[in-house]
Image (cartoon, rainbow, N blue to C red):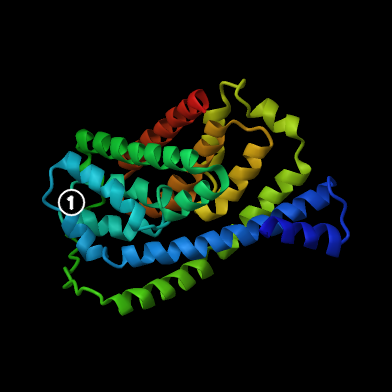
Amino acid sequence: MLKQAADYLTFDLMGLTPGTRLGEALNFFLYDTTKIFLLLTTIIFVVAIIRSSFPPERTKRILSHKREYIGNILAALLGIVTPFCSCSAVPLFIGFVESGVPLGVTFSFLVSSPMVNEVALIMLWGLFGWKIALIYIGTGLLVAIIAGIIIGKLKMEKHVQDYVWKMQVGNADIRVMTFREKIDYARDYTLDLLKKIWPYVVVGIGIGGFIHGYVPQDFLATWAGRDNPFAVPLAVALGVPLYSNAAGVIPIVQALTAKGMAMGTVLAFMMAVTALSLPEAIILSNVLKKPLLGTFFGIVALAIVCIGYLFNAIL
């Protein structure tokens, strides 16, 4: 139905010709905008109800006083139901460190929260199917867990800025919400999140539409296809300077895939955009000293490159 509506608006109402660059680009934009916003509204509302049971105070208590490896796994899993962007996860990161959560565990959360969340899962599921969605979520969790364990083993606590250890974050009492309160919270949270991310979604779909309609298929197939052994690290290097969330980058991922870019390469690009970014580095530089910041970015980037090659080998 959505596809038929997009076809009607593009080719019947606007009079554009199917197969033309402008027609295909605009058709892609109209169809994907409607589909993605419907998916987002539904899934964000559902996950917000789940998220209402995991306020920051409870999250910190769950991760505290656990064995480190278990903490890494729990932190990565909690990243799914506490969907922050890479920058907004930093304040919670500080709270984790101050409350005694091991440093490596906090980094598992810092990687997982922006990269592995309900937006990425449901949009990938809707656009590429459940296998791609679950592979992405599974490998994203693996990156977060391994990165956190490695950083924990390196014992780099001395490279956290001194003021972080001195901060005193209160432990607020946790009040259990009623079902009505959870519904109200989910409604408000959904509207608030959509207000924040809709520009990223529209811009992302617009870029995806441009790629879909105007970029020659053989161009991306040649430079970023399976036959180019440097395509994956190049995609990661290009993704780091950018900043977006999953909602904004997945439409670009869809268009790149349709033009012939290998799935592993394009998903590595997506991971780099969502988990690593220059704005995140700037914010983290106020919390972490350069050796730890460089180690964090290096480990995560290397893990993403490995995941990209793995995707290209098995998909």
Q: Identify the image quadrant of residue 256.
A: top right
Question: Label 1: which residue?
Answer: 101
Q: Is residue 55 above or below residue 121?
A: below
Residue 165 appears in the picture as rendered = no
Residue 98 appears in the picture as rendered = yes
Q: Identify the image quadrant of residue 302.
A: top left
**Residue nearest the viewer, comparing 255 with 49:** 49
**Residue nearest the viewer, comparing 200 with 185:** 185
Q: Quadrant of the N terminus?
A: bottom right
Q: Is residue 240 above or below residue 34?
A: above
Q: Is residue 307 above or below residue 99?
A: above
Image coordinates for residue 97, horizontal then vertical, percent: 21, 53
- Label 1 Cα neighbours within 10 Å, binned few <14 / some 14-19 / many ≥20: many
Amino acid type assigned to the residue bearing label 1 in the image: Val
Q: Considering the numbered disc 1 on the image, is that residue within a helix, a strand or a loop?
A: loop
Q: Is residue 160 above or below residue 232?
A: below
